[in-house]
Image (cartoon, grey):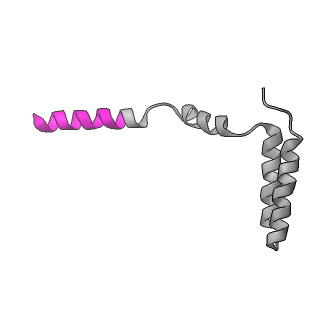
Amino acid sequence: MRLAILVGLMSVGLLAGCGGTEADAEAPVQAMRPPPCEYACELARNYCLRNAPTAEAAAACHAEYDLCTSECPAPL
């Protein structure tokens, strides 16, 4: 009897922990993506940083990123 109750509680806990569909799990990730302009600036900065051979080049990447994001439209 105890085993049946324990198994029942465990299955409810597992189902409650998994909860939702796969589409529900993707929604928060997409909501965290920045607006298109800022996202493009981030992609450009990441590419620049990967190819920056020196600390000065990396600093230039960050300066270009700041300029890029300053030209993006204000969020609504």
Residue 49 on the magenta segment: no
Q: Is residue 65 above or below residue 21?
A: below
Q: Position of residue 31 (x, y in %)?
A: 65, 34
26 left or right, relative to 10: right
Q: Determine the main secondary structure of the stretch shown in magenta.
A: helix
On the image, the x and y values in percent for residue 39 come to 78, 44
User: Going 65% across and 38% down the picture, which residue do you hit?
Assistant: 32
The N terminus is located in which quarter?
A: top left
Residue 27: image quadrant is top right
Residue 53 is situated, as x and y percent measured from the top left of the image, at 82, 73
* Residue 52 sits above or below residue 18 on the image: below
> To which quarter of the image does residue 72 belong?
top right
Residue at 77% across / 57% down in the picture?
Answer: 46
Q: Quadrant of the C terminus?
A: top right
In the figure, is residue 32 to the left or right of 64? left
Residue sticking out furthest to the bottom: 54
Q: Position of residue 45 (x, y in %)?
A: 81, 56
Q: Measuring 83% from the left and 40% from the top, which residue is drawn there?
A: 37
Nearer the observer, 18 or 62: 62
User: The magenta stretch spans which residues?
Assistant: 1-15
| Residue 5 is inside the magenta segment | yes
- Please, which residue is most extreme toward the left here? 1
Q: Is residue 7 left or right of residue 49?
A: left
Q: Nearer the viewer, residue 43 or 66?
A: 66
> Does any portion of residue 44 appear in the rendered image?
yes
